[in-house]
Image (cartoon, grey):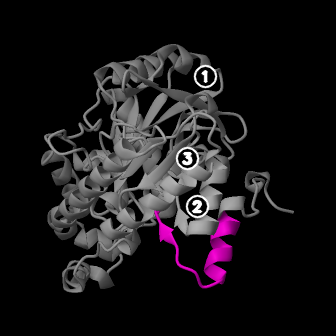
């Protein structure tokens, strides 16, 4: 009766069951997987949001397939402040980055026939989004070489076949926090041009580079066919307002055809609400305050994790974070990362992500992924039980 696109495992895994049992028993959980900033203590003032979303124009329905011009101009101004020139005509508003992926997969692929490449490690949502569009997925590995995560040109080329239509790229990556340098960008550009592929670049963590190391957007790309995705979820720390966007970049002739076709897709949905579009300018202008607060917590929690790894008796390695919200800790060879996470959740009430959740390759060794959004006191409280659990394992 149900679509084959939904034929993935729906049962709870061991880790989920352990957390559920602890919560059912009324026992506390320290959640070091928290990715929702509104649950981590970062909230806008109600009065500010009420003013931004309270436009008198909310009672008028006047849809534009690309989104209201004022909102697209606000997004263009966001890029201009980062030294990037983007025309409002090249911007399409969506209800979320996830919806943006769905639109682009409709634009680029034939269901059940074509495929896309996704980076590994990376966020598993990409696989679900492709599967819901009945699009095949193949991973291309990121390799940790000489202290950096790299795209391997030979392995990327080997993953491409006649059905491939696009390469997904998360830049900065989630969860590794790695940023593509010019060498990696060249590898991706060359592959896209050689094989006639589009690049889909997810830049939701663009504003969370380490202090003094801003991340450079792809939005001005003129060489390879390319779409940039982002939105208020991370840019303004407002996932509940449901406003994302797609920037169409790449060669001019291709860009014009892509925009004409994408406008048809957008016109079919018209999914973005009027209040958030009318409030976009004020929201984007005021977002720096909350991003700054998040940056301060990221730095404090990363320092705590670094000190813990340095003092640990278990040979832990905190991998470099160039951007993003996560700390990746490499564990000693032989540690069962899933068993460790299940034990921590059930016995100590500390919830962490094992590396396999993000498709870390087994040959790269076991890893734990910790959200640096956690409250600082929670992070400090959670690290000693992890150290003790490592002793048991």
**Quarter where residue 177 is shown:** top left
Q: Are marks 2 and 3 in contact (CB under 8 Å)?
A: no
Tell which circle, 3 or 1, labels the residue nearer the N-terminal end.
3
Q: Is residue 30 located in the magenta-colored stretch of the structure?
A: yes
Rendered view: 376 above or below 221? below
In the image, what residue occupies the spot 25% across and 44% down?
Answer: 209
In the image, what residue occupies the spot 39% across and 33% down?
Answer: 226
Secondary structure beneath dot 3 equals: helix
Rendered view: 392 above or below 328? below
Q: Which residues are magenta?
A: 16-33
- In this rendering, does residue 172 appear at all? yes
Q: Are marks 2 and 1 in contact (CB under 8 Å)?
A: no
Work out which quarter of the rendered image holds the N terminus and state it.
bottom right
Q: Which residue is mark 1?
A: 159
How far apart are labels 2 and 1 at the CA level? Answer: 36 Å
**Residue 80 percent across, percent down from the top left:** 14, 46
**Quarter where residue 3 is shown:** bottom right
**Residue 210 percent across, percent down from the top left:** 23, 44
Q: Nearer the viewer, mark 2 or mark 3?
A: 2
Q: Which residue is mark 2?
A: 344
Secondary structure beneath dot 1 equals: helix
Tell which circle, 2 or 1, labels the residue nearer the N-terminal end.
1
**Residue 124 percent across, percent down from the top left:** 57, 48
Secondary structure beneath dot 2 equals: helix
Closest to the observer, 319 or 78: 319
Rendered view: 274 above or below 174? below
Label 2: how many residues lie within 10 Å, few (<14), some (14-19) or many (20+)? Answer: many
Mark carried by residue 126: 3
Tell which circle, 2 or 3, labels the residue nearer the N-terminal end.
3
């Amino acid at each position: 009766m149900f679509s084959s696109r939904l034929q993935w495992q729906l049962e709870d895994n061991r880790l989920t069951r352990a957390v559920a049992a602890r919560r059912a028993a009324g026992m506390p959980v320290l959640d070091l997987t928290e990715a929702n900033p509104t649950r981590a203590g970062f909230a806008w003032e109600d009065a500010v949001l009420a003013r931004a979303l309270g436009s008198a124009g909310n009672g008028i329905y006047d849809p534009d397939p690309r989104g209201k011009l004022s909102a697209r101009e606000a997004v263009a101004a966001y890029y201009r402040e980062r030294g990037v020139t983007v025309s409002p005509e090249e911007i399409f508003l969506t209800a979320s980055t996830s919806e943006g992926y769905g639109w682009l997969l409709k634009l680029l692929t034939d269901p059940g026939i074509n495929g896309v490449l996704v980076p590994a490690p990376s966020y598993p949502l990409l696989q679900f989004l492709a599967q819901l569009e009945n699009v095949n997925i193949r991973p291309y590995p990121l390799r940790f070489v000489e202290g950096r995560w790299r795209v391997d040109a030979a392995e990327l080329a080997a993953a491409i076949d006649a059905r491939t239509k696009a390469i997904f790229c998360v830049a900065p990556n989630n969860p590794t926090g790695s940023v593509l340098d010019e060498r990696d960008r060249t590898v991706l550009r060359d592959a896209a041009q050689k094989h006639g592929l589009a690049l889909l670049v997810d830049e939701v963590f663009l504003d969370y580079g380490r202090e003094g190391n801003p991340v450079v957007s792809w939005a001005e790309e003129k060489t390879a066919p390319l779409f940039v995705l982002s939105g208020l979820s991370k840019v303004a720390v407002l996932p509940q307002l449901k406003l994302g966007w797609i920037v169409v970049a790449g060669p001019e002739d291709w860009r014009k055809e892509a925009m004409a076709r994408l406008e048809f897709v957008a016109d079919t949905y018209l999914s973005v609400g009027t209040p958030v579009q009318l409030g976009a300018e004020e929201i984007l202008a005021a977002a720096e305050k909350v991003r700054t607060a998040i940056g301060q917590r990221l730095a404090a929690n990363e320092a705590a994790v670094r000190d813990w790894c340095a003092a640990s008796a278990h040979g832990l390695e905190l991998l470099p974070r160039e951007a993003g919200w996560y700390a990746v800790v490499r564990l000693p060879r032989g540690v069962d990362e899933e068993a460790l996470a299940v034990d921590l959740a059930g016995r100590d009430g500390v919830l962490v992500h094992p590396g396999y959740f993000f498709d870390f390759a087994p040959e790269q060794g076991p890893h734990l992924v910790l959200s640096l959004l956690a409250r600082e006191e929670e992070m400090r409280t959670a690290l000693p039980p992890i150290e003790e659990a490592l002793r048991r394992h």
